[in-house]
Amino acid sequence: EVRLVESGGALVQPGGSLTLSCAASGFTFSAYDMTWARQAPGKELEWVSSIGQTSTYYVDSVKGRFSISRDNDKNTLYLQLNNLKTEDTAIYYCVLGNQFNWRGNARGQGTQVTVSS
């Protein structure tokens, strides 16, 4: 059974930083592309970033501020969030798949990121 467990969300001031983690189990983590998606209040689920074995991809609104990475030995996916803005407030989800096929795939319960002064 695929299991994805996100952590690291918090309340942070604008300009602050956070690191989100996603612990994966139940599948061969190293063999799959992985994605971070987010859902802001009242909005649809939005693709944020994906990672293959080495390639990384980002939505334009987070380029230069967010960084996705993975540790295949630890079966863990990460998202480093820097220079956070109020519009980054959302529930962040770890999703199996890449930027083309992530919708409808297995995802975790999410972790809340709130950016507010």
Image (cartoon, rainbow, N blue to C red):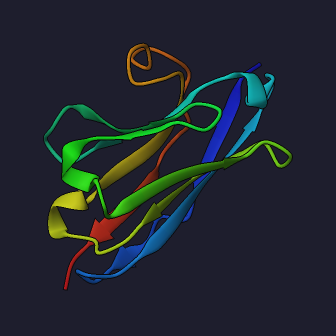
Location of the C terminus by quadrant is bottom left
| Quadrant in the picture for residue 32 | top right
Looking at the image, can residue 50 be seen? Answer: yes
Looking at the image, can residue 36 be seen? Answer: no
Count the marks: how many? Answer: 0
- The image position of residue 43, as x and y in percent, is 15, 38
Foreground residue among 95 and 5: 95
- The image position of residue 99, as x and y in percent, is 39, 24
Location of the N terminus by quadrant is top right
Foreground residue among 45 and 101: 101
Vertical arrangement, residue 53 with respect to residue 22, above or below: above
User: Residue at left 65%, top 36%?
Assistant: 4
Q: Is residue 23 left or right of residue 35?
A: right
Vertical arrangement, residue 97 with respect to residue 3, above or below: above
- The image position of residue 77, as x and y in percent, is 63, 47
- The image position of residue 36, as x and y in percent, is 45, 40
User: Residue at left 26%, top 35%?
Assistant: 46
Q: Is residue 2 left or right of residue 39?
A: right
The outermost residue toward the right is 73
User: Residue at left 27%, top 83%?
Assistant: 13
Vertical arrangement, residue 86 with respect to residue 38, above or below: below
